[in-house]
Image (cartoon, helix red, strand yellow):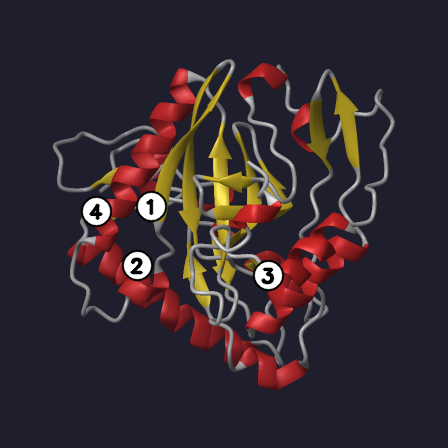
Amino acid sequence: MPCKSFALASCGLTRRQAIASQSRTTPKSLPLDVPVDEEMIPGYDPKNFYHPNPEDILDHRYKLKAKIGWGTSSTVWLAQDISCWRWLSNHYVVIKINDCRYANKEAARHELDISDRIAGANAHHRGRSILRTVVDSFELVSPNGSHLCLVFEPMREPLWLFRRRFGADRVTHPFLPLFKAYLRILLEGLDYLHSECHIIHTDLKLDNILVTFEDQSVIESFVQGQVENPMARKLMDGRAVYLCHNDFGDFDGKPALRKMSPKITDFGLAERGDQPGPRIHPIRPNHCHAPEILLGTGWS
């Protein structure tokens, strides 16, 4: 809910920040007959989704800044944690707002359970920090049901986009040292996942390996850009659908690269490896299938 002027302190806002929020540029309006982001999903029903707006405060704590992603059953938003002390630097998170359909709520709960198991294993293993897990969760209520929200550390971009910045869709000679370093890091994370957590990811691909931000200032610049150039939107039947904006810009050469590292994400399809099988159903993208998966002989 929006902050009242007499409650600025409780919302973590100074008067200057409140005035700035009131002077935001009006978002560009999109044609009503052109599908936007999640509206392009086959069988899309707006009643299933939660439709927030920038500057909304969720769970009395998270102030939304921009929609940075969407999927078949969720939208993803960058938010500021306004529960932090105001004299500290801004703390940002990413919130995955799941739709209210029962099957998708169960899938989100499964991801939360897997994440809790990962977070509760051996905290001293070097691979623990390579896995991006849920840091908080809460539920939102809409007229059509409840929406489970999962809160994560913000990440810059997927590995496929990060690699493309080097000017090639393959491992080139300049990219090779970085590729080797990232491979070692990811293997540490997988070792922790398998040996300490007894969990199989089942959907490991470039989309599910994200790269960290090189500096907090990148997020700050992005948020300021949303004030000056807000996301375009459609207004229909009392709800807004925003056009996703997730371009955090280029990074500044080798100094930035030294501060960035990969993390394994998205455990929505992960499975417990310490439970009885057999496991013969297909997993992973087609081009990543192991021989036992292709032959249907079972995997572990």
Disc 3 element: loop
Measure the C-alpha gap from mark 4 to mark 3. Answer: 39 Å
Mark seen at residue 190? 2
Measure the C-alpha gap from mark 3 to mark 2. Answer: 44 Å
In this view, the mark in front (4 or 2): 4
In the foreground, 209 or 35: 35
Mark seen at residue 14? 3
Figure check: 11 above or below 217: above
Measure the C-alpha gap from mark 4 to mark 1. Answer: 13 Å
The amino acid on which the numbered mark 3 sits, given as a three-letter code, is Thr
Measure the C-alpha gap from mark 1 to mark 3. Answer: 43 Å
Q: Which residue is mark 4?
A: 117
Q: Quadrant of residue 60?
A: top left
The residue at 17%/57% (across/down) is 195
Disc 4 element: helix
Figure check: 64 above or below 13: above
In this view, the mark in front (4 or 3): 3
In the foreground, 284 or 297: 284
Q: Which residue is mark 1?
A: 201
- Mark closest to the chain's N terminus, 4 or 3: 3
Disc 2 element: helix
Callout 1 crowding tier (Cα within 10 Å): few <14, some 14–19, many ≥20: many
